[in-house]
Image (cartoon, coloured by chain):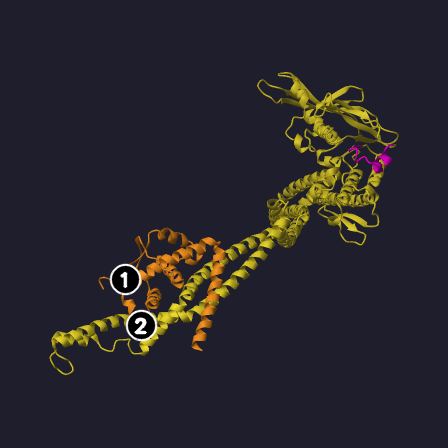
């Protein structure tokens, strides 16, 4: 199968462009060179749009734009229709019977609207029968022929973007590869046979039960046991699918996180540091307030210390002289005055004596008041004197504490700044979300693995039960002569199911083994470090593993370019095994491929081009001397050029 | 006793200064009486007093605790060189008011002249220097 011609009308950059893919000598190798923006990738999109109705390789800035050429749509004016059309002419067999797929979309600019809208789309397949009559198949029927050409489930192995190759093993999960291998091996037929046989078996068993109640009872017991077994097997399968999906996600997330620092830990550490800084700030503030309060007290006492010291001296002197407290009790003198009689000698008090007693009493009252005051202040003055050195000591300690905390603050802040610097330029939220997802999937994988282990042990037990009840049922069937014919049919069906299942497994294992061998072969041809890499293997979950010559797995450590080459080798292997001889179209096939490997990849293109059609879309810089030296004499070379006047892309012959 | 003053007065113009300086860290959680005592001690240390011309009641005497009273009384004792002076409460409080009036201006100058952190570190240095000088002087007088 090959593409003979691609005709694009009013499709994106192409107002009217036909690309003929004529064979050059014995090779079916085609090189289309075009600068960025002229519509190189849109050739890939045009083919996808024609066959499947979508454009998986669309540039971000074109998403949401109509497939029609914007200038043509705009200039069409109101109510005038514009037909956007892509024809893909193919040749399905060596008889060169022409056939083509065509997809048309009709656009109209409605009154009052600025953007033309699509008002209809149709898809058809034109071919000729052996008598030369044209046959037209539309919509669903036409799509059936697409499935013969390149099935949609396999298109990413036929039409792909080299820029995506380096990410291939991030995107092509085990599940995707397993689906592709199922599609390639066409084991679906065997699955359908097995299912049909199981239904026939079930009917035979029911028929046999009708012959005896014992057989019926044994059948029911077996079916009951089998149902339990099937339920658990079903749950185990779901579990294993979930484990595989979780592993795919884990791998994808690990790859996504591989280029980033441990952001989650850094963000967590930064959070801790923020809390620590907050705590330090609070502690410094508290200590400063405490110190300020002690400065208040100590400065007050220090400034007043000479007065305190002198006061203590004067008070102590007064106490030492016995002047404080007063030597005479004023109440005694008050009694003498009130009764006019001396309390000691009993003599009457005359006026002069009374006057002297009054003066004395006044002095004693003052002295008592002063005495009380100084007695009350004296301990405070002493306490201040004693406390002051302690307060000054505490101020010094607080000063040191504050300095230590400030130092701690400085170091903590510096660590935070360092983390901040490392995190600059990374989308923290996205990376943290990735890390969280990674943990979630790791937990899911572990939970499901545990559950699967439990189910496996249950299944062993249930299988034993089912085998025993099957044996009982068989014995009941054996006992019953009437069931002999049915018994033979049942045995036949059981054998058929066994054979079909074994055949399916053999085919799958065979395909897997072939893919491993072919991928290894192609990869060895493509890579320049031939002594470095060993085998490629596909595990039971269809994960690809690449081994170093020394036996260590090394897929995670190879460069993006090498990953691209491995993906390309795998794709070529899939082609070879699939039996589909559909063409391969690769956009930017040497993207990220180093100069050393470019001539190798070009040689592989030339080799593959001998057996099947390859269309390669290069930018001028990608079509470097390493590549063009190998391909120029072997490939049909074309050049895309933007016509400035019409603002559309046209085709020219390539002249280097 | 009936003639004893029941409150301490400040100059009306000092009210705004007190309100401003109370925001400084060293007066955190301190009341009017504490600010007054502090200003009084500064004035007395500098032996600067100034009559209060337009009086404004500022602190009720009852609010002073024994320690505050000991500081006020010691000032009066040293000023008059007479212990009995402390029975003259009106005179004692008037002395305290006059020293506080002068001291407040000195304190305000110190606070305004430099940033607060510098004020605090100057104060700390001053305390240590003065205390060491005091210790030296008192050991000399004992010796």
Q: Is residue B30 visible?
A: no
The C terminus of chain A sits in image quarter: top right
Asked whether, in this view, residue A549 is left or right of residue B102, the answer is right
Q: Position of residue A525 (x, y in %)?
A: 84, 43
Q: Are marks 1 and 2 in contact (CB under 8 Å)?
A: no
Q: Which residue is mark 2?
A: A375
Q: Give the vertical position of A179 relative to A551 (above or below).
A: above
Which span is picked out in magenta?
A615-632
* Chain displayed in orange: B
The chain coloured yellow in the image: A
- As drawn, B27 above or below A654: below
Q: Which residue is mark 1?
A: B90
**Quarter of image, res A176:** top right
Q: Is residue A178 magenta?
A: no
Rendering quarter of residue B57: bottom left
Q: Using residue A175 as the reference point, say whether residue A131 is left or right of it.
A: right
**Foreground residue among A507 and A252:** A252
Give whichever of A115, A246 is nearer the camera: A115
Q: Is residue A547 above or below residue A166?
A: below
Residue at (75% x, 52% y) in the render: A553
Name the quadrant of the N terminus of chain A: top right
Tell me the mark number nearer the camera, choosing from 1 and 2. 1
Q: Nearer the viewer, residue A479 or A207?
A: A207
Judged from the image, the secondary structure of the residue bearing numbered disc 2 is helix
Residue A79 left/right relative to B18? right
Q: Are marks 1 and 2 on the same chain?
A: no
Residue A77: x and y in percent read 64, 17
Taking depth in this image into account, of A436 and A240 the one nearest to the observer is A436
Q: Secondary structure at mark 1?
A: helix
* In-image side of A135 versus B129 (left or right): right
Whether residue A185 is visible here, answered yes or no, is yes
């Amino acid at each position: 199968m090959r593409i003979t011609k691609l005709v694009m009308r009013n499709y994106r950059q192409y107002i009217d462009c036909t690309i003929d893919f004529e064979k050059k000598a014995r090779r079916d190798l085609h090189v289309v060179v075009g600068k960025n923006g002229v519509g190189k990738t849109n050739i890939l999109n045009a083919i996808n749009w024609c066959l499947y109705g979508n454009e998986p390789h669309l540039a971000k800035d074109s998403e949401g734009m109509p497939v029609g050429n914007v200038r043509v749509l705009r200039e069409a004016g109101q109510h005038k229709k514009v037909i956007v059309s892509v024809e893909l002419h193919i040749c399905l067999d060596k008889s060169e019977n022409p056939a083509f797929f065509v997809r048309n979309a009709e656009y109209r600019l409605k009154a009052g609207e600025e953007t033309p809208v699509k008002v209809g789309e149709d898809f058809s397949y034109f071919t000729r029968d052996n008598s030369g009559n044209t046959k037209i198949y539309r919509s669903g029927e036409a799509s059936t022929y697409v499935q013969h050409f390149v099935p949609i489930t396999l298109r990413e192995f036929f039409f792909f973007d080299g820029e995506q190759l380096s990410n291939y093993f991030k995107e092509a999960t085990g599940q995707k590869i397993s689906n592709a291998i199922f599609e390639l091996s066409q084991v679906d037929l065997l699955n359908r046979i097995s299912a049909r046989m199981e239904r026939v078996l079930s009917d035979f068993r029911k028929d046999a039960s009708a012959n005896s109640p014992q057989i019926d009872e044994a059948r029911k017991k077996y079916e009951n046991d089998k149902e339990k077994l099937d339920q658990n097997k079903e749950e185990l399968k779901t579990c294993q699918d979930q484990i595989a999906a979780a592993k795919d996600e884990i791998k994808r997330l690990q790859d996504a996180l591989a280029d980033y620092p441990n952001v989650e830990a850094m963000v967590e550490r930064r959070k801790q540091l923020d809390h620590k800084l907050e705590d330090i700030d609070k502690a410094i503030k508290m200590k400063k307030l405490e110190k300020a309060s002690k400065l208040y007290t100590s400065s007050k006492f220090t400034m007043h210390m000479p007065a305190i010291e002198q006061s203590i001296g004067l008070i102590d002197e007064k106490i030492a002289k016995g002047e404080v407290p007063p030597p005479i009790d004023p109440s005694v003198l008050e009694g003498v005055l009130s009764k006019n009689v001396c309390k000691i000698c009993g003599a009457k008090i005359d006026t002069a004596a009374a006057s002297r007693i009054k003066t004395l009493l006044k002095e004693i009252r003052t002295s008592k008041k002063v005495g009380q005051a100084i007695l009350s202040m004296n301990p405070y003055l002493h306490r201040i004197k004693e406390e002051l050195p302690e307060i000054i000591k505490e101020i010094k300690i607080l000063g040191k504490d504050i300095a230590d905390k400030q130092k701690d603050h400085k170091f903590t802040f510096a660590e935070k700044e360092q983390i901040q610097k490392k995190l600059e330029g990374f989308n923290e939220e996205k990376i943290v979300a990735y890390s969280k997802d990674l943990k979630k999937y790791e937990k899911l994988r572990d939970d499901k693995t545990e559950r699967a282990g439990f189910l496996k042990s249950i299944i062993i037990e249930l299988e034993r039960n089912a085998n025993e009840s099957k044996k009982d049922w068989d014995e009941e069937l054996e006992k019953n002569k009437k069931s002999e014919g049915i018994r033979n049919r049942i045995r036949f069906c059981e054998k058929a199911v066994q054979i079909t299942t074994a055949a399916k497994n053999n085919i799958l294992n065979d395909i897997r083994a072939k893919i491993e061998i072919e991928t290894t072969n192609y990869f060895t041809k493509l890579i320049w470090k031939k002594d470095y890499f060993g085998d490629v293997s596909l595990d039971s979950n269809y994960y690809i593993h690449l081994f170093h010559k020394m036996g260590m797995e090394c897929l995670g450590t190879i460069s993006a370019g090498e990953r691209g080459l491995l993906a390309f080798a795998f794709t070529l292997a899939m082609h070879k095994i699939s039996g589909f001889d559909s063409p391969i179209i690769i956009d930017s096939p040497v993207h990220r491929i180093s100069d050393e490997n470019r001539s190798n990849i070009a040689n592989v293109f030339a080799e593959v081009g001998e057996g099947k059609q390859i269309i390669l879309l290069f930018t001028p810089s990608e079509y470097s001397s390493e590549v063009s030296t190998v391909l120029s004499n072997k490939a049909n070379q074309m050049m895309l050029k933007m016509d400035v006047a019409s603002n559309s892309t046209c085709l020219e012959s390539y002249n280097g | 006793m009936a003639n004893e003053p029941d409150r301490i007065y400040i100059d009306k113009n000092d009210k705004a200064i007190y309100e401003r300086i109370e925001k400084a860290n060293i007066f955190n959680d301190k009341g009017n009486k504490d600010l007054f005592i502090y200003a009084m001690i500064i004035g007395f240390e500098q032996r600067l007093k100034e009559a209060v011309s337009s009086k404004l009641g500022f602190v009720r005497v009852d609010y002073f605790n024994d320690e505050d009273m000991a500081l006020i009384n010691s000032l009066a004792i040293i000023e008059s060189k007479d212990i009995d002076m402390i029975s003259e409460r009106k005179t004692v409080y008037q002395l305290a008011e006059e020293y506080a009036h002068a001291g407040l201006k000195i304190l305000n100058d110190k606070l305004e002249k430099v940033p607060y952190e510098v004020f605090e570190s100057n104060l700390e240095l001053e305390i240590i220097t003065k205390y060491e000088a005091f210790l030296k002087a008192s050991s000399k007088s004992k010796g």
